[in-house]
Image: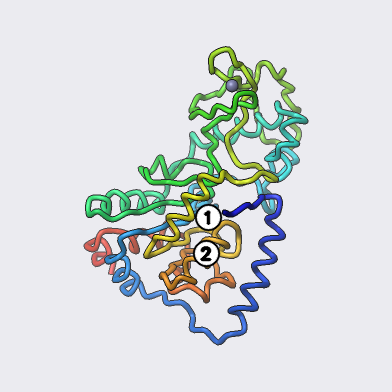
Amino acid sequence: MIVLQRSCRGLINSHLYVHLKRQWGSQNMARPSSDLAAFREIFSKAKNIAIITGAGVSAESGVPTFRGAGGYWRQWQAQQLATPEAFSRNPSRVWEFYHYRREVMLTKNPNPAHLAIAECEERLSKQGRQVTVITQNIDELHRRAGSKNMLEIHGSLFKTRCMSCGHEAANYKSPICDALEGKGAPDPDTNDAQIPVLQLPRCEQKSCHGLLRPAVVWFGESLDSDILTQAEKVLDSCDLCLVVGTSSIVYPAAMFAPQVAARGVPVAEFNMEDTPATMRFKFHFHGPCGTTLPPALGRLYWYKYQK
Ligand SMILES: [Zn+2]
């Protein structure tokens, strides 16, 4: 069983980076292929395809991550607000942040990468073949594109969990509660709304009324072990693995994809840049995944037409 904490990300990543460099960096390996026809040949025979997706796929839909240069909500980045400590200190502020993120999603749409994955899943399922999306994104754009077979390993912006009874529920209300209406402005000079805790989203289970929190995995929290076990199963049985819009040295692709490659299973990376793990993979397709994925996963006539 994998027990990992997001708080350990830096440690895990730098650890793996060194490991990857030592193992592969010194070898004189050939660059991975970017031969689309060769990929299509393998893809056409694969029965069990795992697709690991990350922030890059969401970024192409314009979804803000509040990380990295310029990625601020008021004066904070996600790492400072997406923690159990921040929530217990100031649940009103953290709910404003998530309310804002939920509302922003109403203005964003799945892009060609999400659509290509969903269409591929549906088409292959009719042939008795399986596609499973393992995503670290919490925006549900895969679901909105039509994907059904999904593991959201970091949870969802549109799910809540009760702090008292633990009940989890889907929640697409806008606004999620009356008190948050019009709140959550991202500008740095906005004051906290300081909403009383009883007016924040509350549990609707009978006689509970506990405080709800977003059902996402916060920094410092463990991933859901059931979901991780399911992800392991998918990766252990897949005969083709795609890593899309996430660096293969950044968790979770860091632990998933090299593990699949080590079994001798072809891994294809679709990313804006190379990573130290790139050389380990059979294929690497460079560029925005909204451009590279549709011809890779689309129907054959589409691919031929594009040629
Ligand atoms: Zn409850």
Element type at marker 2? loop
Residues at circles 2 and 1 in contact by the CB criterion of under 8 Å: yes
Determine crowd level at label 1: few under 14, some 14-19, many 20+ residues with C-alpha closer than 10 A.
many
Q: Quadrant of the N terminus?
A: bottom right
Residue at coordinates 38% horizontally, 43% vertically from top-left? Answer: 145
Q: Which mark is residue 171?
A: none
x%, y% of residue 41? 29, 71
Residue at coordinates 53% horizontally, 38% vertically from top-left? Answer: 156
20 vs 147, nearest the viewer? 20
Report, in whole angstroms, how far the alpha carbon at label 2 lies from the one at label 1.
8 Å
Residue type marked 2: Met
> From the viewer's perspective, is 235 left or right of 153?
left
Most extreme residue toward the front, as rendered?
Answer: 1
Q: Tell me the residue that label 2 is attached to.
A: 272
Q: Tell me the residue that label 1 is attached to.
A: 56
155 vs 37, nearest the viewer? 155
Residue at coordinates 60% horizontally, 30% vertically from top-left? Answer: 99
**151 relative to 258, above or below:** above
Residue type marked 1: Gly
> From the viewer's perspective, is 73 left or right of 176?
right
